[in-house]
Amino acid sequence: MKKAVSLVLALVLALSLTACGTKKQTEKQEETQSAVELTVFAAASMQETLTKIIDMYKTVAPNVTVTPTFDSSGTLLKQIAAGADCDLFISAAQKQMNALDGSLKGDTDKNPDGLDLLAQGTRVNLLENKVALVAPEGNPAGIESFSDLASDKVKLLAMGNSDVPVGSYTLEILKYLNLDIAALEAAGKVTYGSNVKEVTTQVSQGAVDCGVIYATDAFSANLTVVDTATTDMCKQVIYPAAILNTTQNQAAAQAFLDYLQTPDCTAVFKAVGFSAAK
């Protein structure tokens, strides 16, 4: 009788230990499975806001590590097209997003290389920005508006390269003002930046009389905005976002993209001059 009881107790203990071990193993597997690393490529003009939001997201999704890469949208596009590891792309213009959008295949103007790299149904217009003419501290040249770009007040203008969204917008403004970019270059009145942050730095350092950047970058750099472009002068500055169809973490990427559209994130964006895309 005693032997039977002992055997039963031993069996119960063994089953208990096995169950405990199995539970711990399952919990460990679940923990490992929930740990996700997201790579986000975003326009350089989002650096301050997105960095802050990523820090906020740690409390929302502690098992998700978001690693951002900030640069001009044109540079990021080239990297994605070349096979760079990216889960979510946020561009400062529709042009770069269109170039990856498979639904636009056949439209050689919008998608010239026929790329199909966006996860279907994930593309959204996330934010809107404004193009601003800014001057260094004290505005020593006394620049008052975009029309002054045609005057002798401006000896040197900083702008983005033509493949950078802010540079493309600047070219539209110059065309609106009937200013020939080739003539300005020949006169030595233009200096370029490979992204909006480089243009902002040139203005902040007083190396130029003025520069064309985004209103949000002007806010972050504490620069004086002397004028803001109207929709007659250049297109709306819309920031589209989309998940790449090459991602291995679509659910986590979608969750982060959804988070970027929450009131908490909207408040962060609005604080520096972004607005919700219309």
Image: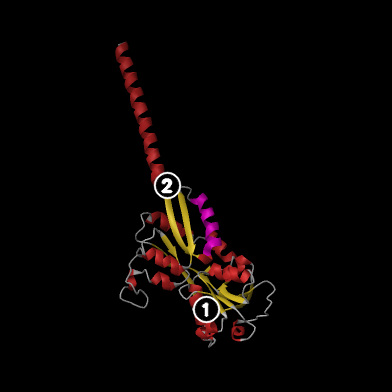
Q: Amino acid at mark 1?
A: Thr
Question: In front of the other: label 2 or label 1?
Answer: 1
Of the two numbered discs 2 and 1 on the same chain, state the one appearing first in sequence: 2
User: Is residue 100 placed above or below 265 in the rendered structure?
Assistant: below
Q: Is residue 150 left or right of residue 138?
A: left
Which disc, if any, is residue 35? 2
What's the residue at 47%, 50% (across, down)? 61
* Scheme of colours in the image: secondary structure
Looking at the rendering, the stretch of residues picked out in magenta corresponds to 46-60
Residue drawn at the location 32% of the way across and 11% of the way down = 2
Residue 57 among those drawn in magenta: yes
Q: Residue at x 43, y 54 (%)?
A: 38
Q: Measured from the top left, where is residue 53 in percent x and y?
A: 53, 57
How far apart in space, not on screen, are marks 2 and 1 (Cα)? Answer: 42 Å
Say if the magenta span includes residue 125: no
> Label 1: which residue?
170
Residue 276: x %, y % from top left: 51, 68
Instruction: Say what secondary structure mark 1 lies in.
Output: helix
- Please, what secondary structure does the residue beneath circle 2 have? loop
Residue 151 drawn above or below residue 20: below
Tag shown at residue 200: none
In the displayed image of the protein, which residue is found farthest to the bottom? 178
Could you tell me the amino acid type at mark 2? Ala
Can you tell which quarter of the image residue 152 is in? bottom right
Relative to 258, residue 6 above or below: above
